[in-house]
Amino acid sequence: MLALFVALVQNVNGQSWYSGSGNGSRSSNTTSATATLTIMNRSSYSLTVKIMKTGGRGLYQTVSISPKSSSTVSFYRSDTFFTKTKATKGLETLYKKSGTFSIQCDEEGYSQATLEFFVSSGGGGTGQGISKAEFESNK
């Protein structure tokens, strides 16, 4: 049996906005930051990760990640998501669905999160096992 372990590390960085008038009000002319999620594959399996919007709102983005590599996804507004993951190595395939996580990207700050995937043999793992049909569904 294969196990897929997922860890989410998230930092929310605040930004400051200053106007040139010295009155301390926020300025809409400053550069806004983009929230990011770095997805790290810490295994020898190839991963296909679908980032899904919660509440049945569908697919946000699909990312394919080679073994022992990573990919970064950008977000432009705050929202809540979950992942569907397919891990493959040779003839072995494992499908999992994660719990929800939130991304912040607004005037209060922006997320810089890291999602790490560990795939190994043995029992256990985090996330809910799903079928191939559930993985392929974009809901």
Image (cartoon, rainbow, N blue to C red):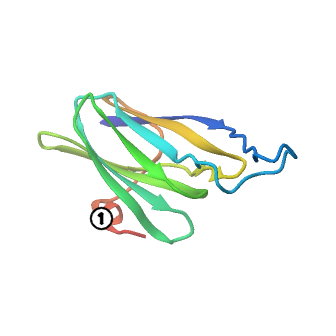
Q: Which residue is mark 1?
A: 136
- In depth, the one of 1 and 87 nearer the eye is 87
Residue 100 appears left or right of 22? left
Q: Within the image, what quadrant is residue 60 found in?
A: bottom left
Q: Which x, y percent locates residue 41? A: 33, 33
Q: Is residue 118 above or below residue 30?
A: above
Q: What amino acid is labelled 1 in the image? A: Glu
Q: Which x, y percent locates residue 114? A: 48, 35
The crowding category of the residue bearing disc 1, from other C-alpha atoms within 10 Å (few below 14, some 14 to 19, many at least 20), is: few
Residue 53 appears left or right of 92? right
Q: How many marks?
A: 1
Residue furthest toward the front? 21
Residue depicted at x 54% and y 49%: 99
Q: Is residue 136 above or below residue 117?
A: below
Residue furthest toward the left? 90
- In depth, the one of 77 and 98 nearer the eye is 77
Residue depicted at x 41% and y 47%: 73
Q: Which x, y percent locates residue 72? A: 38, 42
Q: Quadrant of the C terminus?
A: bottom left
- In depth, the one of 104 and 41 nearer the eye is 104
Residue 52 appears left or right of 27? left
Q: Is residue 135 above or below residue 57?
A: above
Q: Is residue 61 above or below residue 88?
A: below
Q: Which x, y percent locates residue 1? A: 30, 36
Q: Indicate the secondary structure of the residue bearing disc 1.
A: helix
Residue furthest toward the right? 23
Residue depicted at x 37% and y 68%: 138
